[in-house]
Amino acid sequence: MSAHVHPCAGLLAAGARWLAGTRVRWVEAPSGDQPRVYFANHSSHLDFVVLWAALPPAIRQRTSPVACQEYWKSSALRRYVSTRVFRSVLIPRSHEATLGGRGALTPLLAELDRGRSLVLFPEGTRGTGLDIGPFKAGLYQICRQRPRTEAVPVYLDNLHRVLPKGEFIPVPLVSTVTFGKPLQIEPDEDHRHFLDRARRALRDLKRR
Amino acid sequence: MTLLTLLAGTLAALLVATAAGLILRRTVTSERGRATVVNMNLRIATWWVLCGLTAAALLAGRAAVCLLFAIVSSLALREFITLTPTHRRDHRALFWSFFVWSPLQYWLVWSRYVELALILVPVCAVVLIPARIAIAGQRERLFQRSAAIFVGLMLCTYALSHIPLLLTLELSGAPGGSAALLFYFLLVVQASDVLQWIWGKLAGRTPAVPRISPNKTWEGYAGGVLSAVALGTLLHRATPFSAASAALISTLITLLGVAGGLMMSAIKRSRGAKDSGAILVGHGGILDRIDSLCLSAPVFFHVVKWLYAA
């Protein structure tokens, strides 16, 4: 699989990072090059770009976002940005919510098997940024199917103030990206327990 | 004494500080001392950048100085608003602060519309910020929210813009002109900060305001202010001031600098932060560097305007 990065992706990442004054913190330094699932709180259109820009370049070029097909295929520009610029893996929203929609996860698992990492927003949609919403089951499904995959919590602070949902002009405040300690699923862990553990790991980064 | 003399003196001081830092790095052995020296060397390195940028802007002219301070104001405002809780519905008022009020203020300064520059924020923005928040339709804590944004704009943009505003003054009997006066002001106030730090490290014993700034001591304050006043008096030939008035004016601006520092520390502490950011390595954020200028700059501008401007 080529590790080619679209030139617009690099530009957008640099721009977003400059605009959002991003400070990056790693609780545990990244090691190895095995595929990972980065999961983060979601409150702004800038979330993915800023998170992606905060990754070291070698990891960045092997990392794709997971995005909602209905939203990102609804116009030519959105389709271009999501599929060509950022090489998103698009999945239908109706399946995100359910445990049953395993078929929808096939492209995600294929991506991991190809050695690429994923960025996932398990809340499924952008929130107000004040609290972390309940997680959908996709994160659990991926970790259950590929139990050796590490799930890395990433807390994005202040981006809901830089560009809140419903606004289109960003305000240049200082934001922070905190990468937490990777989690792995336990052999007999059920979906509620795992998602709860993942959500708590993300919440704990907020308090740091 | 001209601007170039002041710049050469600053260069010499930086060289001495850098040499002292290198010597201290070899001689200090205690763990706490080493940490202080490492921090000191980072601060000196950042001072090279800050002095270099200021000198380059002053030599390039008024437009460059306005641009430099417009950037500093934006970065300071960004840190201030980041520290301040705002509501989601304040987004447009914030957009106006960053992209309209702040650039407009510096445009007025650059265009020499001095009267307008002096009223833009305190007369216009003070009404238009709450008005924009009111249009957004969220009335909860409207007063506190507008006040926070307004204070940010006053401190970070309005107050700081008085520094480039000095360049619009026609001074009588100033050998170095207004550019030298501007540099003199920055030199005295910032040297006071540095000297307070040095005196505090060397002789600091009695905490002055332990609940706001645990590291500030009476010895540091007194030593720093007195030595900065001595510096300001010595350099009076760069300004239109006599030696006696230079001493008085230096006392005034260094004391107002202390007040500005205390105000910013109190704001930061009330938001649970020690530093406002990390953009200036060793110092913290921009706000930590400009806090002493917030109050002293407008007062210095008006003192010079009333007493020395033609």
Image: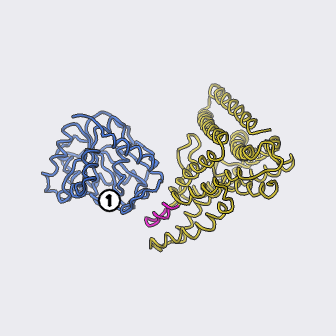
Q: Is residue B98 above or below residue A59?
A: below
Quick check: B106 left or right of B10? left
Quick check: A65 left or right of B238? left
User: Can the viewer see residue B285?
Assistant: yes
Q: Residue B92 colored magenta? A: yes
Drawing shade for chain A = blue
Mark 1 — on which chain does it sit? A
* Residue bearing the label numbered 1: A126
Q: Which chain is yellow?
A: B
Segment tinted magenta in the rendering = B85-96
Q: Residue B131 colored magenta? A: no
At 19% across and 37% down in the image, what residue appears? A114
For label 1, the SS is: loop
For residue B127, what is the image quadrant? bottom right
For residue B194, what is the image quadrant? top right
At 43% across and 64% down in the image, what residue appears? B88
Figure quadrant of the N terminus of chain A: top left
Q: How crowded is mark 1: few (under 14 residues within 10 Å), some or many (20 or more)?
A: some
Q: Main secondary structure of the magenta part?
A: helix
Image spot of residue B253 (x, y percent): 75, 52
Image spot of residue B303 (x, y percent): 78, 56
